[in-house]
Image: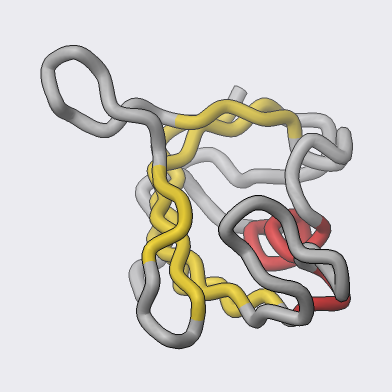
Amino acid sequence: MQVGTGAELTAGKKAAVLYMGWLTNGTLFDQSPTGSDGKMQAYPFTMGAHQVIPGWEQGLAGMKVGGVRLVIVPPAVGYGAQGQGPIPGNAVLVFYVRLVAVQ
């Protein structure tokens, strides 16, 4: 969707992203936390540390700061047959992700 020009996200680096996640039926099931000012706050994680689903690690690898990706996550690298919370089992997930920082 948009190629960034900043630092590249690779294993071991800390990332901060803004994101929204939908089921294929259009239901929004998750998004970046919102601060008291009503603006989305960046979600931090370390690439390769298993802090996010495998589909994110695969889909965001090599992304550069300022970039935007639409990441389609099949169940095998999402939440599988068991699902989680509002995500049903065997769900394909669609994420809009903007990489805002890499350290």
Q: Is residue 76 visible?
A: yes
| 81 relative to 96 in the view: left or right | right
Quadrant where the C terminus lies?
Answer: top right
Please say if 86 is above or below 10.
below
Residue 93 image point, x, y percent: 59, 74
Q: Residue at x 36, y 80 (%)?
A: 26
Q: Residue at x 38, y 63 (%)?
A: 28
Residue 97 lies in quadrant: bottom left
| 102 relative to 30 in the view: left or right | right
Q: Residue at x 50, y 75 (%)?
A: 23
Please say if 28 is above or below 15.
below
Residue 84 image point, x, y percent: 72, 55
Q: Is residue 4 visible?
A: no
Residue at the extreme left: 37
> How many numbered callouts?
0
Q: How is colour applied across the structure in the image?
A: secondary structure
Quadrant where the N terminus lies?
Answer: bottom left
Work out whether residue 92 or residue 72 is closer to the camera in this orientation and state it: 92
| 70 relative to 77 in the view: left or right | left
Please say if 84 is above or below 100.
below
Residue at the extreme top: 36
